[in-house]
Image: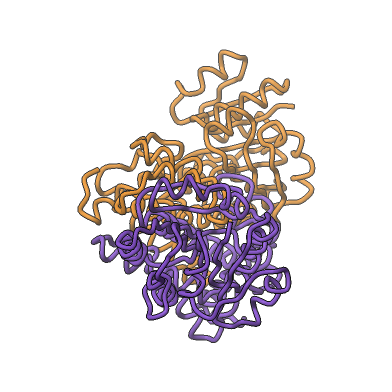
Chain colours: A orange, B purple
Amino acid sequence: MRIGWIGTGVMGASMAGHVQRAGHELVVYNRTRAKAEGLLAAGAAWRDTPKDVAEATEVLFSIVGFPDDVEQTYLGQSGVLTADDPPGIIIDMTTSRPALAREIAEAAGGRGVRSLDAPVSGGDVGARNAALAIMVGGDRSAFDEVLPLLQRLGANIAYMGPAGAGQNTKMCNQILIAGTMIGVCEALLYASRSGLDAQAVIDIIGKGAAGSWSINNLGPRIVAGNYDPGFFVEHFIKDMGIALDEARALGLSLPGLALVHQLYLAVRAQGFGRDGTQALMKALKLLNGQSL
Amino acid sequence: MRIGWIGTGVMGASMAGHVQRAGHELVVYNRTRAKAEGLLAAGAAWRDTPKDVAEATEVLFSIVGFPDDVEQTYLGQSGVLTADDPPGIIIDMTTSRPALAREIAEAAGGRGVRSLDAPVSGGDVGARNAALAIMVGGDRSAFDEVLPLLQRLGANIAYMGPAGAGQNTKMCNQILIAGTMIGVCEALLYASRSGLDAQAVIDIIGKGAAGSWSINNLGPRIVAGNYDPGFFVEHFIKDMGIALDEARALGLSLPGLALVHQLYLAVRAQGFGRDGTQALMKALKLLNGQSL
């Protein structure tokens, strides 16, 4: 099948590579062409705009940066939906606004195109190992048709409902992580301040009712002073901002998420936007007059 | 060995039973004698005060309700440390104030008694199955001596440091749970309000980086409207209050814990103090004008 791929950053390049190795013909576009070189060297074709990719392909994936980039990709002047002969199915895998996913689905429908919003979790490692979780909203028949392709990318794939449902599920994921992370950082700060060996604390409390992926995977990095990014603070701020906007639109007060979002803004204000999300600890340390 | 056991409630009765079945001679006291009947029927001896239990035993355990009960048990008028011939080792397994653990250890030292603070996690099920996590602070040699007894009660046992270190570790556990729970409840509230199937959301996000014991075990109960207690709201409020008091004494600001504590106070104010901790959802629903 001729498959379009827009967005060949850290995530996109790995993911498109899996599709390519499965024997599909790739047609790619990325804002920075250099990041597509690996795929091009392996036989992918290049096009200069999303519209041109759309003209040349039957199924089109995108995974770009921010909701504005998604909007530009699909609804912009040289966007996918301006193509004379658009793909039958489009799949945006960026973490983006649920309302935008619905808007794109509606515009796509007007062109006879079926749309899916399919954000992922699992980070660069998950993308590389084809072990992503993929949360899908949109047209059910399109989901069934592209499922074999999605199975090349992820290990844990769920159809969640109509357009926007994939994005909303990803928001649930991020809200859950936000709460867990404040618990992780406050627990570890209390541990060190009360004179405990913080790693020993993780070792015992991480196995029981307080256990989580975050305490067991990011906790040890915090203890070791390792703030290298698995997932960037600034991307997490973007996601929490989307969740808070959407919650406000739903008339929903989420005080925990709002607090954690504010603390992450403080992390970024201190210049740590390109740290990993475990750098929430830095805001809590600064708040408590500790050195970093 | 003749072992004293003070506090034969839901947790204590199960735990003392394991010690008894290991072949030790039990001497028990509980505020409400009826709750000790099972142990007495199985051969335990009864005494009318903690002091009397202390006179009769070599190692003495306690697991009672609140820090005031712990203080009364050890330092009160008929307390353990008023015994003429106190046990060589005392082990308080109540979740209690770290400062009180240090106070008891000091008073015990003055009587030639070695003291341990050894709070547990794992709830009534963990107590029944001898699968508790046990976090121990205090005298290291005493820990080594009673470890075989602790191994009758728990599967995951760690020596954490001097007196109070067990309690401080338990506080870390509760701080971590507090953060995780606000994430769980806000994520599930967002899920239902945005039209998702909340159980389907748990099924996909519970496996990845957002995963935790809480979302995978308490999440489905929330979705099912099941607020039966694994661990009472009012006990969790007690524990968070201890953590906040101790943090204040350490000069430590923990904004996430403070917020969650306030929301749990609202849960109790609405009359749900005897619900399980997943009833945090009730505070968030009320906050958002939803019916329960």
* Viewport quadrant of the C terminus of chain B: bottom right
Q: Is residue A204 left or right of residue A82?
A: left
Image x and y of residue A30, in percent:
49, 29
Residue B157 relative to residue B20: left or right: left
Q: Where is residue A174 in the image (x, y as percent from the top left)?
A: 51, 53
User: Which residue is painted at 45% across and 52% down in the image?
Assistant: B136
Please tell me which residue is depicted at 38% across the width and 45% down the height of the picture. A198
Residue B98, visible in the rendered structure: no
Q: Quadrant of residue B26 in the image?
A: bottom right
For the residue pair A197 and A80, the one nearer the viewer reads as A197
Asked if B263 appears above or below A92 in the picture, the reply is: below
Q: How many numbered dots are placed on residues in this image?
A: 0
Q: Is residue A106 above or below residue A224?
A: below
**Residue that protrudes farthest toward the front in the picture:** B84
Residue B74: quadrant of the picture: bottom left
Of B144 and A238, the residue lying toward us: B144
Whether residue A248 sits left or right of residue A6 in the image: it is left
**Is residue A131 shown above or below B90?**
above
In the picture, the quarter occupied by the N terminus of chain B is: bottom right
Tell me what residue is drawn at x 43 percent, y 59 percent: B117
Whether residue B51 is visible to the viewer of this picture, yes or no, is yes
Residue B202 in percent (x, y) is at 65, 56
Image x and y of residue A218, in percent: 45, 41
In this view, A54 is above or below A186: above
Q: Which of B86 and A125 is in front in this view?
A: B86
Q: Residue at x 52, y 68 (%)?
A: B56
